[in-house]
Image: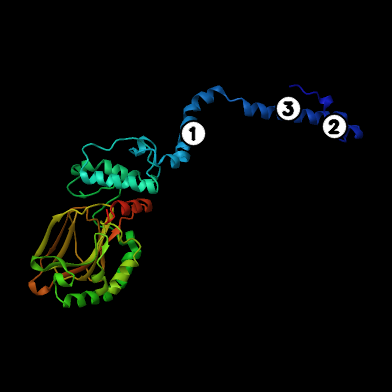
């Protein structure tokens, strides 16, 4: 389309007699508009050819993010290959990858539970859990130092013993209530160690457990016997109280006893021991690293590492007593904790 400057309405410049100035201004305006039009409509062919794949990739990623919510109930899960696919664990799982045929019955049960969870909520953030379930068949390939027996969550930084800062709030709460917790234990202990009054796992040489939570279920009668300790547990921010991976209670180990080397069920939790009665020559070895309990202080460790407990003190030293509490590993995200609560629900 060609426009004639003579056909365009001119403002008051005509009345002022400045035709040359107004013509120049209108010419510059038209040239500017034409330049903007050309810049917006013409794409450099070379740049288009080089950037086509990148643009397509960005469009595809944008579509997968915006359309994922409509496809959750239609698609099965995919393997998140992390750096290979460029996707993080917080992105939705959107593939038809089949579950490994050689997977164990327990892994298949957990996979079904995760599918049910995703139908109710979302696949978003389930990448690590999905990857862990698909790799359960390789649990036996893990090192002999760390080998969780039930579920391994990939890419969780793990060390045998963790610093207090990993769960500073909960550790400070437990230690601040040490004296009251100890008093409630002593009251229970004086009633005698017997199944009839709530004790379990009684073994030779003074081994016994007085559970407050057992596999995610509150032991109501025992909690009523220790009301302050029970309220203290509920005040913790990371206590695993809703699934079968979490427990809490008083653990006794008599003199001359050793609990053989074993692995915990998962690396998604940490075990916190508050020392109540800690005679000399009591030791906890985790992943080859030895530590000793101290009365009124907490030890925080990952029991998915090979660990051993021993009490080599004299008979008159009395039992070693700790309050054991299972806490979430700080590197397990909130969405993953919610999914694991569902998958390991005591009701399933």
Residue 92 visible in the snapshot: yes
Disc number placed over residue 98 in the picture, else none: none
Residue at 16% over, 63% down: 283
Q: Earlier in the sequence, mark 2 or mark 1?
A: 2
Q: Earlier in the sequence, mark 3 or mark 2?
A: 2
Which of 243 and 43 lies nearest the eye of the viewer?
243
Separation (CA) of disc 3 from disc 2: 17 Å
Disc number placed over residue 31 in the picture, else none: 3
* Mark nearer the viewer, 2 or 1: 1
Separation (CA) of disc 1 from disc 3: 34 Å
Disc 1 to disc 3: CB gap under 8 Å: no
Q: Quadrant of residue 6?
A: top right
* Mark nearer the viewer, 1 or 3: 1
Which of 216 and 189 lies nearest the eye of the viewer?
216
Q: Which residue carries the number 1 mark?
A: 59
Residue at 34% over, 63% down: 168
| Secondary structure state at the residue bearing disc 1 | helix
Separation (CA) of disc 2 from disc 1: 46 Å
Q: Quadrant of residue 201?
A: bottom left
Q: How many marks?
A: 3
Q: Which residue carries the number 2 mark?
A: 10
Residue 125 visible in the snapshot: no
Query: Left or right: where does residue 210 sit relative to residue 26?
Result: left
| Secondary structure state at the residue bearing disc 2 | loop
Report x, y in % for residue 19: 87, 29
Disc 3 to disc 2: CB gap under 8 Å: no
Local crowd size for mark 1, using a 10 Å CA cut-off: few (<14), some (14–19), many (≥20): few
């Amino acid at each position: 389309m060609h426009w004639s400057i003579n056909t365009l309405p001119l403002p008051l410049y005509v009345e002022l007699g400045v035709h040359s100035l107004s013509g120049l201004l209108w010419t510059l305006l038209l040239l500017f508009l034409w330049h903007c039009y050309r810049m917006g409509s013409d794409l450099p062919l070379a740049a288009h050819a080089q950037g086509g794949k990148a643009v397509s990739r960005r469009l595809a990623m944008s579509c997968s993010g915006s359309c994922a919510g409509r496809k959750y109930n239609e698609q099965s899960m995919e393997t998140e290959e992390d750096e290979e696919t460029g996707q993080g664990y917080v992105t939705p799982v959107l593939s038809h990858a089949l579950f490994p045929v050689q997977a164990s019955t327990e892994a298949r049960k957990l996979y079904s539970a995760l599918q049910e969870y995703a139908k109710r909520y979302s696949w978003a953030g389930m990448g690590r859990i999905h990857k862990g379930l698909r790799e359960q068949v390789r649990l036996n390939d893990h090192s002999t130092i760390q080998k969780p027996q039930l579920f391994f969550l990939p890419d969780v930084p793990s060390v045998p013993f963790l610093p207090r800062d990993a769960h500073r709030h909960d550790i400070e709460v437990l230690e601040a209530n040490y004296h009251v917790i100890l008093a409630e234990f002593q009251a229970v202990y004086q009633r005698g160690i017997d199944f009839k009054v709530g004790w379990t796992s009684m073994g030779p040489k003074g081994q016994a457990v007085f559970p407050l939570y057992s596999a995610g279920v509150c032991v109501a009668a025992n909690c009523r016997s220790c009301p302050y300790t029970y309220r203290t547990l509920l005040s913790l921010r990371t206590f695993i109280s809703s699934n079968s991976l979490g427990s809490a209670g008083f653990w006794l180990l008599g003199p001359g006893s050793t609990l053989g080397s074993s692995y915990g069920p998962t690396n998604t939790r940490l075990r916190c021991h508050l020392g109540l009665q800690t005679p000399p020559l009591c030791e906890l070895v985790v992943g080859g690293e030895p530590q000793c309990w101290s009365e009124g202080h907490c030890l925080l460790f990952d029991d998915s590492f090979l660990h051993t407990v021993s009490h080599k003190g004299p008979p008159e030293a009395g039992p070693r007593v700790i309050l054991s509490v299972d806490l979430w590993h700080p590197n397990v995200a909130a969405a993953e904790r919610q999914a694991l609560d569902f998958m390991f629900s005591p009701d399933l």
